[in-house]
Image (cartoon, coloured by chain):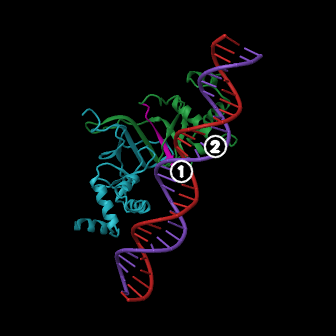
Chain colours: A cyan, B green, C red, D purple
DNA sequence: CAATAATTGCACTTCCATTGCATAAGAGAG
DNA sequence: CTCTCTTATGCAATGGAAGTGCAATTATTG
């Protein structure tokens, strides 16, 4: 577990018990989570602390924010294929209309989008909605 | 102006003074508007009325909702090139980080997105962020 | 250990979205 | 035309998420 310590250090984040717990919680989830999810997982902790911890992670490019159109912000750990700190990271997200979960399709990059003359594209948010593998068929 | 009456009838929406005003307001804007924008334009009317009018329009596929990532829902009239009632309408939206306005790029269709095995794609939401033509140097 | 800086918890506030209910307006039957 | 029934509108209030100020606690450094 020395790994995590080093990871935190490399990201310039001070290690606290809270942060470690939240990080592990995120690492164990394979879907994006809401602040509410984190709250439910750590009922003893205060909302604000969780909120600010996530914000810290976001600032330090440990998690990225996902806007899947539900109106509620979700978060997911940045993975090896994910370069959220670089603005050219453009993986897409899939939102399941059935189970309401959102996952990162890290290895599915967003194709180049053409914009009209005079427009400057800096970032792209792409969310595919439908039915996920767990909900479809099986 | 008989046109509008017929249009409303074809959409199965009863014509009221309020609805006509809001429709005209939307028609005259070339950017997506927030509920707040509509409120400011019609200070004499109640928020709820405006809200429900927009919702009615949405139900009847007169306007479509846009989630541009600002956290505030915006709305825009469905245009001739826009088939919001059909789930295959996939035009993209552009959000300007400078003036904070969002416009429909109706004639820019979203390319086909490949999703992994087992996933069923039903809809795609794509927002390009950057600087719009009015804000970029020109 | 003292002094400083960062983190956490509590209490609020703000803002948008949404609903319940009473009233007003409109459409249709007789 | 009037009564009835449906739909729209207005007012009040609620709920949920996001964010902030401040005090208290915990960690870090000298």
Label 2: element kind: helix
Residue A75 vs residue B84, the one in the foreground? A75
Can you give x and y, in whole percent of width and height, for residue B109 in the image?
Answer: 43, 35
Question: Dot 2: few (<14), some (14–19), or many (≥20) neighbours within 10 Å?
Answer: some
Label 1: element kind: loop
**Between marks 1 and 2, how big is the CA–CA gap?**
29 Å
For residue B136, the mark is 1
Residue C28 vs residue A76, the one in the foreground? C28
- Quadrant of the rendered structure where residue D21 is? bottom right
Name the residue: 37% across, 58% down.
Answer: A43
Question: Dot 1: few (<14), some (14–19), or many (≥20) neighbours within 10 Å?
Answer: few
Name the residue: 68% across, 43% down.
Answer: B43
| Quadrant location of the C terminus of chain A in the rendered image | top left
Left or right of B34: which side holds B83?
left
> Dot 2 corresponds to which residue?
B39
Name above or below for residue A94 compared with residue D30. above
- Quadrant of the rendered structure where residue A78 is? bottom left
Is residue B7 at least partly visible in the picture? no
- Quadrant of the rendered structure where residue B48 is? top right
Magenta-tinted stretch = B88-97
Give yes or no for residue A100 being in the magenta stretch.
no
Name above or below for residue D13 compared with residue B112. below
Q: Nearer the viewer, mark 1 or mark 2?
A: 2
Left or right of A30: which side holds B13?
right
**Letter of the chain that mark 1 sits on in the rendering:** B
């Amino acid at each position: 577990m020395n790994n995590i310590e080093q990871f935190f250090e490399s990201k310039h984040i001070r290690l606290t018990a809270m942060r470690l717990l939240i990080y592990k919680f995120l690492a164990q989830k394979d879907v994006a989570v809401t602040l509410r999810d984190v709250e439910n997982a750590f009922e003893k902790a205060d909302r604000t602390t969780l909120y600010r911890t996530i914000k810290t992670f976001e600032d330090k490019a440990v998690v990225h924010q996902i806007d899947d159109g539900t109106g509620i912000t979700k978060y997911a750990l940045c993975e090896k294929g994910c370069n959220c700190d670089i603005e050219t990271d453009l993986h897409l997200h899939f939102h399941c209309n059935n189970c309401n979960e959102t996952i990162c399709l890290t290895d599915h990059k967003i194709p180049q989008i053409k914009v009209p003359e005079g427009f400057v594209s800096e970032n792209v948010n792409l969310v595919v909605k439908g039915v996920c593998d767990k909900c479809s068929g099986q």
